[in-house]
């Protein structure tokens, strides 16, 4: 039994004009009426939901089918499923399509009630008249739960998360990956400079607002035994330092100017810390001592430890 049908004519669903990326393979199909079709004869375009949804939340998906052949495509059902099982097998009735015409149908996509973000990023298979097309959607589509998030701090317009850790721990790479995943297409984003080793690729405190979300990521310069010696970390965490603060600045030289703008400090106060610790630094005594000392300064905040470069 089908798990979906055409939406009623009064439905006002307007999909985002953002197509899913897909692999295109050529398939030959012979219909009962000896009609021979290939993937060149049929083009299927799918769009994100009209609004972002949460992981584990079902949604309606607009699907446009183009008949690029000189034959009438008989009415049949379009079937969708995913190998991971996240998208349950479901289908929608597609009416007959005249040569070189197109129709748009609305598939009710039923998904497993899960919070496993890995599953929702799986490939979805669409089958129509023997043609098989595989596509997946941007993670952006499944960030609906974040849309409704309201920071608990009354002075904070967004939830502030500082990316902090040992120099060369891939903080900026992580930041670029998060921003890329939350964009509406598959264009890789490179807002933060990245590199490797112990040199500083980030020399300034920089904030990154995530589009459409009340979450802000703050990128910092890497931790070494020779920096964060003048209380800079505590000043950063309580919101005293503005975006653009250079790692070589001395707070006392700018004290008067910063205190004049202390009224906005609450909007910069950090709520959580992502602490990046390269796996190799755990093998060095001076590295573990630095980590322990620094961790004592952030233990009043929500923390998450990340261990990048575990191959070291």
Image (cartoon, rainbow, N blue to C red):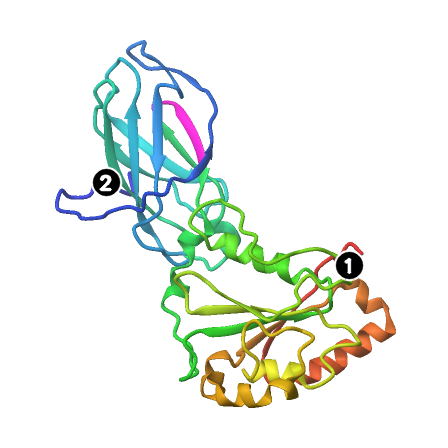
- Foreground: 136 or 159? 159
* Residue 33: quadrant of the picture: top left
Find the distance from the CA under tag 1 to the CA under tag 2. 55 Å
**Above or below — where is 158 with respect to 176?**
below
In the structure shown, which secondary structural element does the residue marked by tag 1 occupy? loop
From the viewer's perspective, tell me whether residue 228 is left or right of residue 128.
right
Q: Residues within 10 Å of mark 2 (few under 14, many from 20)?
A: some
From the viewer's perspective, tell me whether residue 219 is left or right of residue 29.
right
Furthest residue toward top: 34
First in sequence: mark 1 or mark 2?
2
Residue at (47%, 74%) from the top-left corner?
159
Furthest residue toward left: 10
**Above or below — where is 205 with respect to 96?**
below
**Above or below — where is 281 with respect to 6?**
below
- What residue range appears in magenta? 129-134
Question: What is the number of the mark on residue 166?
Answer: none
Question: What is the number of the mark on residue 5?
Answer: 2
- Dominant secondary structure of the magenta stretch? strand
Q: How many marks?
A: 2
Q: Position of residue 120 (x, y in %)?
A: 46, 50
Q: Position of residue 152 (x, y in %)?
A: 42, 81
Residue at (77%, 73%) from the top-left corner?
224
In the structure shown, which secondary structural element does the residue marked by tag 2 occupy? loop
Question: What is the number of the mark on residue 197?
Answer: 1
Q: Position of residue 132 (x, y in %)?
A: 42, 28
Q: Position of residue 259 (x, y in %)?
A: 53, 90
Can the viewer see residue 299 in this picture?
no
Where, quadrant-wise, is the N terminus in this rendering? top left
From the viewer's perspective, tell me whether residue 141 is left or right of residue 68.
right
Residue at (29%, 26%) from the top-left corner?
66
Furthest residue toward right: 285
């Amino acid at each position: 039994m089908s798990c979906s049908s055409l939406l009623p004519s009064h439905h006002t669903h307007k999909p985002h004009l953002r197509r899913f990326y897909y692999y295109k393979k050529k398939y030959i199909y012979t219909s009962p009426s000896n009609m021979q079709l290939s993937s060149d004869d049929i083009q299927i375009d799918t769009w994100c939901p009209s609004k972002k949804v949460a992981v584990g939340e079902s949604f309606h998906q607009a699907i446009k089918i183009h008949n690029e052949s000189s034959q009438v495509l008989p009415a049949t059902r379009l079937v969708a499923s995913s190998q991971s099982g996240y998208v349950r097998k479901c289908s929608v009735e597609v009416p007959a399509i005249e040569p070189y015409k197109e129709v748009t149908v609305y598939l009710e996509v039923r998904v497993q009630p899960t919070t496993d973000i890995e599953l929702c990023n799986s490939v979805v298979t669409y089958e129509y008249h023997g043609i098989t097309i595989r596509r997946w959607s941007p993670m952006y589509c499944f960030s609906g739960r974040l849309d409704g998030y309201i920071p608990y701090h009354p002075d904070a317009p967004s939830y502030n998360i500082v990316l902090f850790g040992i120099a060369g721990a891939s903080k900026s790479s992580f930041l670029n990956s998060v921003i890329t995943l939350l964009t509406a297409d598959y264009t890789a984003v490179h807002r933060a400079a990245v590199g490797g080793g112990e040199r500083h690729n980030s020399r300034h405190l920089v904030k990154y607002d995530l589009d459409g979300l009340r979450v802000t990521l703050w990128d910092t310069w890497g931790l070494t035994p020779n920096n964060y010696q003048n209380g800079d970390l505590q000043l950063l965490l309580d919101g005293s330092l503005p975006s653009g603060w250079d790692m070589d600045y001395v707070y006392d030289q700018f004290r008067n100017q910063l205190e004049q703008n202390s009224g906005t400090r609450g909007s910069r106060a950090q709520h959580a810390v992502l602490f990046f610790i390269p796996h190799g630094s755990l093998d060095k005594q001076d590295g573990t001592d630095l980590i322990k000392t620094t961790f004592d300064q952030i233990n009043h905040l929500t923390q998450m430890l990340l261990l990048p470069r575990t191959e070291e």
